[in-house]
Amino acid sequence: MADMATHVITGAGSGIGAAVARRLHARGDELYLHARDAGRAKELAAKFPGAKTLVGDLDDPDKLSWAFSHQTLPDRIDSLLHIAGVADLGSVGELTPKSWRHQLNVNLIAPAELTRHFLPQLRAGQGHVVFVNSGAGLNAHANWSAYAASKHGLKALADSLRHEEHGNGVRVTSVYPGRTASPMQAKIHQQEGKEYDPSHWIDPESVATTILMSLDLPKDAEVNDLTVRPGR
């Protein structure tokens, strides 16, 4: 990658996103960190000195383009990293349209809209789009229908984008981590009524390592799909 690569990252506040942002920040790359609101943007800017922020609500994808049109954006992007996600468990008999929409908006429609918005900059930089998917993007289990549907959709988005943008030199990677120790995982355990022990699950740093590996691969190769499972 070019010196001083530029990355746009969603989900940099915690978990895998924070681990990736820390690693890229430490090597001196330029970061544009997405935040839901101005308060969160301020927290991210304090956590990653020198990083720029982008504010927009992923749960309201219709307004993202408008929100970004009022902010300064990079002219070229080396990577767009979709790491933000939400999970709300429940059986098909219980999940409401509101819950379905929230998960589809944040996990699928917002990544599609962000990608659409930043494609000109990605083409200019022959950049890389990384979708942090989930094991649920490959298999759907009881009580995971809406989340798994959003992640199955994310795989379809990534696969279509890869075919469409290959000729423009844009690389596309889907990463499917198993359960990862993060605030989201703590919330899922709460919903499942189970005890949460972070040591049982993948360290976000390990997933970050796989994401950086796919970014740093020479341009003659592309990681399409990468599954990361707990090692114990």
Image (cartoon, rainbow, N blue to C red):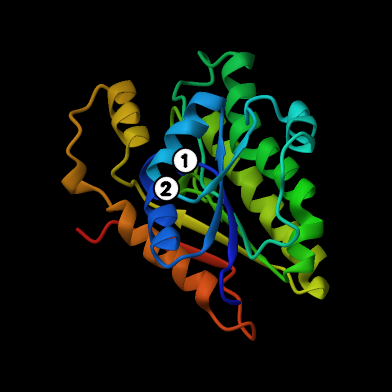
Q: Is residue 50 above or below residue 146?
A: below
Give the position of the C terminus as an image quadrant. Answer: bottom left
Mark 2, Cα crowd under 10 Å, few <14 / some 14-19 / many 20+, is some
> Element at badge 1?
helix
In-front residue for pair 131/121:
121
Nearer to me, 82 or 143: 82
Mark number displayed over residue 62: none
Quadrant showing the N terminus = bottom right
Residue 132 position within the rendered picture, expressed as x and y whole percent measured from the top left: 52, 51
Give the side of residue 48 with respect to residue 99, left or right.
left
Q: Is residue 140 left or right of residue 98?
A: left
Callout 2 secondary element: loop
Categorize mark 1 by other alpha carbons within 10 Å: few (<14), some (14-19), many (20+). some
Residue drawn where x is 53% and y is 70% of the image = 215
Residue sitting at x 42%, y 66%: 210
Residue 45, which numbered label?
A: 1
Residue depicted at 44% across the width and 27% down the height: 143
Amino acid at pointer 2: Phe
Q: Which mark is residue 48?
A: 2
- The answer to whether the residues at label 1 and label 2 have Cβ atoms under 8 Å apart is yes
Distance between mark 1 and mark 2 Cα atoms: 5 Å
Measuring from the top left, give residue 46's x and y in whole percent: 41, 39
Tell me residue 63's x, y (percent): 76, 27
Q: Amino acid at mark 1?
A: Ala
Question: In the picture, residue 181 is in which quadrant?
Answer: top left
Residue 27: image location, x then y, percent: 42, 68
Image-based side of 200 in relation to 34, left or right: left
| Extreme residue in the front direction | 50
